[in-house]
Image (cartoon, helix red, strand yellow):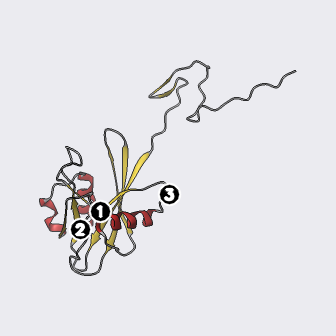
Amino acid sequence: MSKPKKAHRHRRGVRPKAPNAKVTRKGPANGTRQRHFYDVRQYALLRDGAGHLLILQLPKEYDESAANTWTLPGGKLEPTDDPAAGLMREIEEETGLKPSLPVLCGLARWTTRASKKLGIFYRTTITGNKPALTLSGEHQRAVWVTLDELAGFPFHRPEMLEVLKQEQSQ
């Protein structure tokens, strides 16, 4: 007598009921839902000794909808990154600056055509007043501003401005 074959798991962890069941964008034919994950981004509210905030301008080549808009230092959290170390790496890559250890100060979510994003915002500082920096090729310009001056800068993600407004009210 032969052993029964082991049931194999479907590559997404859910095995369709019938061997020929169709798998659609909504999930397998058995009605289970596909799980959605967030693409995690981290940003620094990086201030100098006088309280100025560093903002960076995205280049014309970045994306048609985002060209010449402003953002904060930071970027994607890689799967192997410790959150604080990942943010510090991004700041140093983009600006050449080595700020103090970050402190969590806000969260935001948004959706793009391709994915759902979770933005984690940290407060951090650098010594000196408007210290010189070395800008990477990811941005075309850097400006130190006060929180009151932010209204004059179009931000790529409106959610960033919401976090900055909350920061301003504290």
Quarter holding residue 98: bottom left
Residue 54 badge: 2
Q: Position of residue 22 (x, y in %)?
A: 52, 21
Tell me, yes or no, if residue 54 can be seen here: yes
> Which residue is labeled 3 in the image?
80
From the viewer's perspective, is residue 116 above or below residue 5?
Answer: below
Please say if the residues under marks 1 and 2 sit with CB atoms less than 8 Å apart. Answer: yes
N-term-proximal mark, 1 vs 3: 1
| Lateral position of residue 47 relative to residue 122, left or right | left
Please say if the residues under marks 3 and 2 sit with CB atoms less than 8 Å apart. Answer: no
From the viewer's perspective, is residue 117 above or below residue 3?
Answer: below
Q: Nearer the viewer, residue 46 or 88?
A: 88
> Which residue is labeled 1 in the image?
73
| CA distance for labels 1 and 2 | 8 Å
Kind of residue sitting beneath label 1: Pro
Q: Position of residue 9 (x, y in %)?
A: 63, 32
| Lateral position of residue 169 relative to residue 35, left or right | left
| CA distance for labels 3 and 2 | 27 Å
Secondary element at image label 1 = loop
Q: Determine the residue positioned at 37% across, 44% down.
A: 116
Q: Position of residue 75 (x, y in %)?
A: 35, 57
N-term-proximal mark, 3 vs 2: 2
Quarter holding residue 50: bottom left
